[in-house]
Structure formats: structure tokens, C-alpha cells
Image (tube, helix red, strand yellow):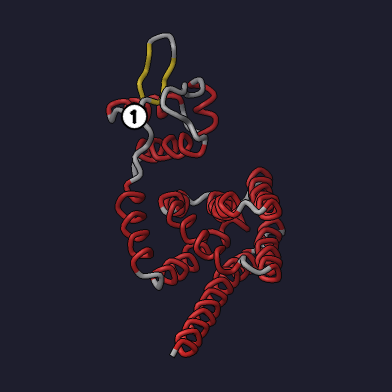
Amino acid sequence: MKVSDKVVQNLRMLIEQSNMQVGDRLPAERKLAEQLGVSRSSLREAIQQLTSQGMLVSKVGAGTYLQQLPTNWSQHQIVQPLSNLIDEDPAYRFDVQEARIILEGGTAWYAAQRATPEDVSKIRHYYQQISHFQSMGDDDQAAIADAKFHLAIAEASHNLVLIQMMRGLFDLLQYNVVLGRRKVYSEAHRYDQLRDQHQQVMEAIEQQDPEAARAAVCGHIEFVVQQVRMIDEEDARRQRASRLNRI
């Protein structure tokens, strides 16, 4: 990858992570170059490239503005089709969980080695948000916080490819979390177990223990898969019993 392409990628990611909206002004050139850790000439080249793509617009004497949100190829090409598959056949959610084990095991491993104090603070913030919304009975917001907790771990890996993959699959991740929570979080003792698992992941990253972080996040996802399968089997048995009673 050319240096200019990497600066463009980093600038796009910064715009996404900052949740900038159309019409927002980018930081001043000097500050933006410092944030990205690049020279001002490399930054100008990246801005010109994104301007030619229609994403940014530069106004003389006024700065550079976001004209169009970054397009997310993976969201349209991967997330929507897979979400449709999950709707049509719930068994596909287990394929998503298997993919998460592979991807998130890696992001947790690197996060434990590379997380900054700011990264750790962000992970802890979403961990607390999960508990906050769960205590309020707001399952939708709890699911969003849950997905953001996992995304924050990916961002703490500081691996651009892993981050882009997780961000691209964020909607699918959130959708999968919602489906899992509807089943697994239906009982208090399971919620306590999942909360403790999230804590183990977070603490392993704080303690800079890559193997423990990877084992904790993979164990967490495997636990959810096991619980969902068990609940599905219990539901199926109840339905069979109900049909027999009507005969």
C-alpha cells in the first residue's frame, strides 16, 4: 500500500470514528496532521484524493468540509445479505458467531498488547453502559452498548484491517447481539455470567495479557452459542410436548 493510500484510509477512518456528519468542518490542517501522525504535504494529498471522490469539499479561506459520508462497501455487500439469511434461517446466526470467534480472538489478542489508556477507558465505558441500560430494562440500548464494547476492543488492536472488518460488520454484529440477548439475557443468572465474561475480557486487556484476552473473548462467544443452542432445544421440546397434548 502506498503511503498516500494509507493516509487516505486513516483519514476516512478518523472521519468515521469521530461520527462526523455532512457539513461538518474537518480540524485545522496542522491539528489533523498531528492526529494522523503524517506530514502536512501527505495530508493535503489525501484531502485532494477524497475531494476528487466527492467525499470532501474545500472552501477557500473557510477550510475543508465533509460533503458525503464514507461509503461502506461491506455494509451493503455483506451485512444486508447475511441479515436476510439470518431472518430466513436462524441457524445462520451460528455461522456469524463462529466468524466472530476467529475475528475477535485476534482483535482481543492485539488489543492486550497495544491498547492505550484512552482505549481502555473507552472499553470500560461501554462495559458500564451495558450494565446501565440492562438495569433500566432497555434491551435495545444494551445491545448497542454490547456491540460497541466489542468494536472498541477491535479499535484498541490498532490494526487497520481488523478495525475496518469489524466496523464494516458492525450492523451485523449488533443484529447478532440482539438475537443472542433475546434468548440468553432472558434469565438473571445468565446475565450475571455474561457480565462477568465481559469483565474478564476487559481486565485481560488492562493487564496486557494477550492469551487471557483471546481466551476470554472466545470463551464468551462460545458460551453464548452453547446457551442459545440449549434454549432452542428446550423451546423445541416444549413445542413438541404442546403438540402431543393437543392430540
Q: Residues within 10 Å of mark 1 (few under 14, many from 20)?
A: some
Amino acid carrying label 1: it is Met
Describe residue 1's horizontal placement relative to residue 121 as left or right.
left
Residue nearest the viewer, comparing 126 with 48: 126
Viewer-proximal residue among 88 and 52: 88
Q: Position of residue 48 (x, y in %)?
A: 33, 25
Q: Quarter of the image for the C terminus: give it.
A: bottom left
Residue 71 visible in the shown view: yes
Name the residue located 64 percent from the left edge and 46 percent from the top edge: 122
The residue sitting at 47% across, 24% down in the picture is 26
Location of residue 147 with respect to 187 vertically, above or below: above
Q: Which residue corresponds to the image point at 42% horizontal and 54% vertical from the top-left?
A: 169
In the image, what residue occupies the spot 35% across and 21% down?
Answer: 57
In the rendered image, the quadrant that contains the N terminus is top left
**Secondary structure of residue under mark 1:** loop
Residue wearing tag 1: 55
